[in-house]
Image (cartoon, rainbow, N blue to C red):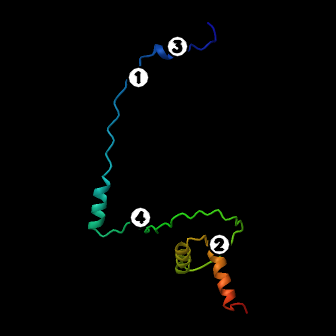
Amino acid sequence: MSGRVDPFAILKDPLPSFTTKPRKEKPVEEEAVARIAEENNFPSRQAAKAPNAPRRKRRVYRTGRNQQFNAKATPETIDKFYKMANERSVPLGELLRLALDALEGAGGSR
């Protein structure tokens, strides 16, 4: 007898019997859960959707300005600044220059 393992030994044994899998239990519909929660005054854990702020029209001007200037302001001030720039059809940098020139001309420097 050789000391080798017979790779076909599994096939000589009778085949295992196969059975069907039991059916999975269907989960409860989300609508039913939501209705029951609402009837029993359970609050939702989902955060309320924030209202989308209206987007401004994209402003693209080729002016040669290449320096960044940031300043914090109230939403009202920012809206006013954009409104004034749109009324004059000028870039924001140009409106800032006009405003600074007007302030300087009015004796705003101390």
Please tell me the numbered disc located at residue 46.
Answer: 4
In terms of secondary structure, where does tag 1 sit? loop
Lower position in the chain sequence, tag 2 or tag 1: 1
Rendered location of residue 70, percent (x, y): 66, 73
Looking at this rendering, what residue extends furthest in the top direction? 1
* Residue 54 in the image, given as x and y percentages of width and height: 46, 68
* 78 left or right of 25 in image: right
Judge the density around disc 1: few (<14), some (14-19), many (≥20) Cα neighbours within 10 Å: few
**Which residue is identified by label 2?**
93
Identify residue type, mark 2.
Gly
Q: Badge 2: few (under 14), some or many (20 or more) residues near its Cα, within 10 Å? A: some
Quote the CA–CA distance across marks 4 and 1. 50 Å
Lower position in the chain sequence, tag 4 or tag 1:
1
The residue where tag 3 is placed is 8
Residue 62's spot in the image, x, y percent? Answer: 64, 62
Badge 3 amino acid: Phe
Could you tell me which secondary element the residue under label 4 belongs to?
Answer: loop
Instruction: Name the residue type under label 4.
Output: Gln
Placement of 79 over or under 66, stated as above or below: below
Answer with mark 4 or mark 2, whichever residue precedes in sequence: 4
Q: Using the numbered discs, state the Cα–Cα distance from disc 1 to disc 3 in whole angstroms.
A: 15 Å
Can you tell which of label 3 and label 2 is closer to the viewer?
A: 2
Q: Do the residues labelled 3 and 2 touch (CB within 8 Å)?
A: no
